[in-house]
């Protein structure tokens, strides 16, 4: 299927949503005219928003859950099996029919096979960087890392901002919840000299745009989100009083303007979250019905996905769920690929992702939540002799998307006979990032300014318009 590429309409950061003309909307319009935005301009923006928002899924997503399968899952052993390939390529696994006629996936994704009517499977992801850290940056930001092709360069203030930071810049949170959250840890690789992956923070936008980080296992009985609870003896009312005092004492004129604004926003959101019972409750996964928790799986990945659902339900714009720190090599299966996949990696990935799709749909949230499942690259088609592993392979791999108007039962693009190279419609990590921003109502052509005032386009990829209904 040939894709239609490119974004439509340019509203920038301000005009991504429709402005409702309810009685409250009319009163808001009157207030806006007092601040310099005249009614003709208001209606022009509203008309533009309506035009773009109905075009190929633009702005349909209120939230996005990005499931980052850190380490690089094998495309042949998950979404793109090649049962007719030689044994040293096809591997040990069989295939299973999905709910979509003619589409088969790995036998170790049985629950996801039953959810294929909700999924668009992309079988033509492709780039040329085989390093974990720099490709994590590209997936999480939609841009090449400052030091590409490298596992030696960790996070830097010169990194491109995380997609959630871009969303927070272009679509600031209107409530007490942070606009972007990352859990259950900041990904790092013990074999990578650079340690933590770049691209997980606010980058050159500044620390005020860092995603709110949740560190820990939501499946643990003593799980708590650090820094979110009120200190003992401090009521929410007293916290609000402290916020008023904080606002009165701060002196932005004595601080660098750009940094002060970002930092004040960060501090303000933190105080709001501390004072808000709603915000604290959203992070309390133990409030869920035990039967719902069981459906996701009583493991760190399943409960992280359940927590992600609670957060988008509470209004968080983008939640990144990283594959957890399992003390091993994550999806980086250089050795014993098949035992690791079938026993350690694929069962929780299958159960958690399938339960998330079912749960979002049952709650009426799937239509307004984009869900993206992807790693930083794939694995070599040919199995390594001697240790049954697969090595890094960025030239062709798979991803999956659902929700927010994505056409289910769809396979986008195709790989060649060995899943080594795209046969048609290659998709870069930049394109995937552009698709996420597009669905969230941020035109990838939007320009923001770096610390020295240069205009920077938020994404240079092309959204996958044809996957949207």
Image: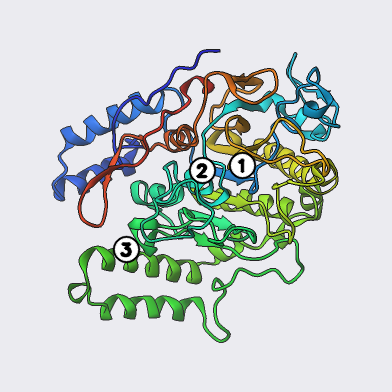
Q: Residue at x 61, y 63 (%)?
A: 281
Left or right, 293 with respect to 2, comes to right
Give the secondary structure at mark 2. Answer: helix
Q: Residue at x 84, y 25 (%)?
A: 87
Say which quarter of the image contains residue 98.
top right
Q: Earlier in the sequence, mark 3 or mark 1?
A: 3
Distance from disc 3 to disc 1, alpha carbons, whole Å, reads 31 Å
Q: Disc 2 marks which residue?
A: 139
Q: Quadrant of the N terminus?
A: top right
The numbered disc on residue 262 is: 3
Q: Residue at x 38, y 24 (%)?
A: 6
Q: Earlier in the sequence, mark 2 or mark 3?
A: 2
Between circles 2 and 3, the one closer to the viewer is: 2
The numbered disc on residue 375 is: 1
Residue 249 image point, x, y percent: 27, 81
- Circle 3 crowding by C-alpha within 10 Å: few under 14, some 14–19, many from 20: some
Give the secondary structure at mark 1. Answer: loop
Which residue, as the protein is rendered here, is positioned at the far front?
386
Q: Residue at x 54, y 30 (%)?
A: 126
Distance from disc 1 to disc 2, alpha carbons, whole Å, reads 8 Å
Left or right, 370 with respect to 106, comes to left
């Amino acid at each position: 299927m040939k894709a239609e590429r490119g974004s439509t309409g340019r509203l920038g950061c301000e005009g991504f949503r429709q402005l409702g003309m309810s009685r409250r909307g009319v009163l808001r319009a009157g207030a806006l005219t007092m601040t310099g935005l005249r009614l003709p301009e208001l209606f022009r923006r509203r008309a533009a928003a309506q035009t773009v928002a109905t075009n190929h899924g633009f702005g349909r997503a209120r939230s996005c859950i990005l499931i980052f399968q850190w380490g690089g899952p094998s495309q042949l052993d998950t979404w793109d099996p090649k049962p007719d390939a030689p044994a040293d390529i096809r591997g040990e696994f069989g295939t299973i029919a999905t709910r979509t006629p003619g589409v088969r996936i790995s036998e170790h994704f049985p629950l996801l096979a039953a959810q294929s009517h909700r999924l668009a499977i992309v079988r033509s992801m492709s780039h040329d960087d085989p390093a974990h850290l720099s490709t994590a940056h590209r997936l999480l930001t939609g841009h090449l890392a400052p030091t590409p092709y490298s596992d030696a360069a960790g996070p830097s203030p010169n990194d491109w901002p995380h997609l959630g930071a871009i969303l927070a810049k272009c679509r600031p949170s209107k409530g007490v919840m942070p606009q972007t959250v990352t859990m259950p840890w900041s990904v790092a690789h013990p074999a990578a000299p650079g340690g933590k992956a770049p691209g997980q923070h606010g980058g050159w936008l500044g620390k005020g745009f860092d995603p709110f980080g949740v560190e820990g296992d939501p499946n643990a009985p003593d799980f708590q989100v650090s820094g979110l609870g009120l200190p003992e003896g401090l009521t929410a009312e007293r916290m609000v009083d402290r916020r008023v005092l904080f606002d009165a004492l701060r002196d932005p004129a004595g601080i660098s303007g750009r940094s002060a604004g970002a930092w004040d926003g960060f501090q303000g959101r933190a105080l709001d979250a501390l004072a808000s019972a709603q915000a604290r409750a959203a992070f309390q996964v133990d409030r869920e019905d035990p039967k719902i928790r069981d459906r996701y799986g009583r493991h760190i990945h399943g409960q992280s996905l359940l927590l992600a659902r609670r957060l988008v339900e509470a209004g968080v714009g983008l939640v990144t769920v990283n594959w957890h720190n399992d003390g091993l090599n994550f999806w980086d299966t250089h050795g014993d690929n098949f035992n690791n996949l079938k026993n350690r990696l694929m069962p929780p990935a299958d159960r958690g992702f399938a339960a998330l799709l079912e749960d979002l749909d049952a709650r009426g949230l799937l239509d307004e939540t984009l869900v993206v499942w992807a790693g930083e690259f794939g694995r070599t088609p040919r199995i390594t002799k001697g240790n049954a592993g697969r090595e890094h392979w960025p030239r062709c791999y798979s991803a999956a998307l659902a929700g927010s108007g994505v056409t289910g039962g769809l396979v986008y693009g195709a790989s060649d006979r060995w899943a080594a190279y795209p046969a048609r419609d290659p998709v870069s990590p930049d394109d995937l990032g552009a698709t996420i921003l597009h669905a969230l109502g941020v035109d990838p052509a939007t320009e923001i300014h770096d610390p020295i005032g240069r205009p920077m386009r938020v994404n240079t990829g092309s959204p996958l318009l044809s996957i949207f209904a």
